[in-house]
Image (spheres, grey):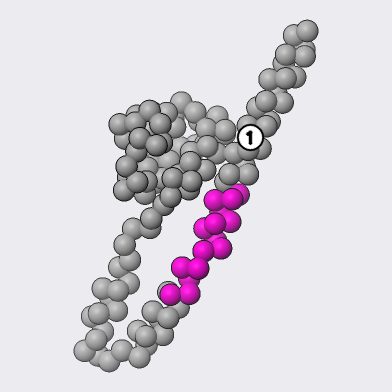
């Protein structure tokens, strides 16, 4: 009977890993299929047409605001880290931002949270 319980546990872990990989793949798909690239190309074209007096303005336009992330983006990254065996580190990271769950974190903190989550598992 213990062999069956071990098998069940291994299968559950494989399912969790698979779900984490699916979430990570969907997040990557969303990132790379976004239409944000098109406006960047038009910015380059307009910068080439700018005169010397306007040269300072494209420099300021290049300084883009921090990217905005959705709760789903953050959830996908944290779920994949958790499924990869870093559940404790993910919980500690949430607690660092004063939350027990992702829904308790302010959306303006998502970028900082993701930046710190990138380090998990890479150290």
Above-or-below relation of 69 to 92: below
- In depth, the one of 1 and 70 nearer the eye is 70
Image position, residue 40 (x, y; %): 42, 74
Within the image, what quadrant is residue 13 found in? Answer: top right
Above-or-below relation of 53 to 106: below
Within the image, what quadrant is residue 11 found in? Answer: top right
Above-or-below relation of 3 to 45: above
Image point 48% across, 46% down: which residue? 72
Tell me the SS state at disc 1. Answer: helix
Main SS, magenta region, reads helix
Q: Does 59 appear in magenta?
A: no
| The magenta segment | 25-39
The residue that disc 1 covers is 17
Within the image, what quadrant is residue 62 found in? Answer: bottom left
| Image quarter in which the C terminus is found | top left
Image position, residue 12 (x, y; %): 67, 25
| Image quarter in which the N terminus is found | top right
Side of 9 where 45 appears, left or right: left
Residue 119, visible in the rendered structure: no
Image point 49% across, 28% down: which residue? 87
Side of 74 where 65 appears, left or right: left
Image point 57% across, 33% down: which residue? 83
Residue 6, visible in the rendered structure: yes
Q: Residue at the front extreme?
A: 103
Image point 31% across, 62% down: which residue? 65
Side of 73 where 98 appears, left or right: left
């Amino acid at each position: 009977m213990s062999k069956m319980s071990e098998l069940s546990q291994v299968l559950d872990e494989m399912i969790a890993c698979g779900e984490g990989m699916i979430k990570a793949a969907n997040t990557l798909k969303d990132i790379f299929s976004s239409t944000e690239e098109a406006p960047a190309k038009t910015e380059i074209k307009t910068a080439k047409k700018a005169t010397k007096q306007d040269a300072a303005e494209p420099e300021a336009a290049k300084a883009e605001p921090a990217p905005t992330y959705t709760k789903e983006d953050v959830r996908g990254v944290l779920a994949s880290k958790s499924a990869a065996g870093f559940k404790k580190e993910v919980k500690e990271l949430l607690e660092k931002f004063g939350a027990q769950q992702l829904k308790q974190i302010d959306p303006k903190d998502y970028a900082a949270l993701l930046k710190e989550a990138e380090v998990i598992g890479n150290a």
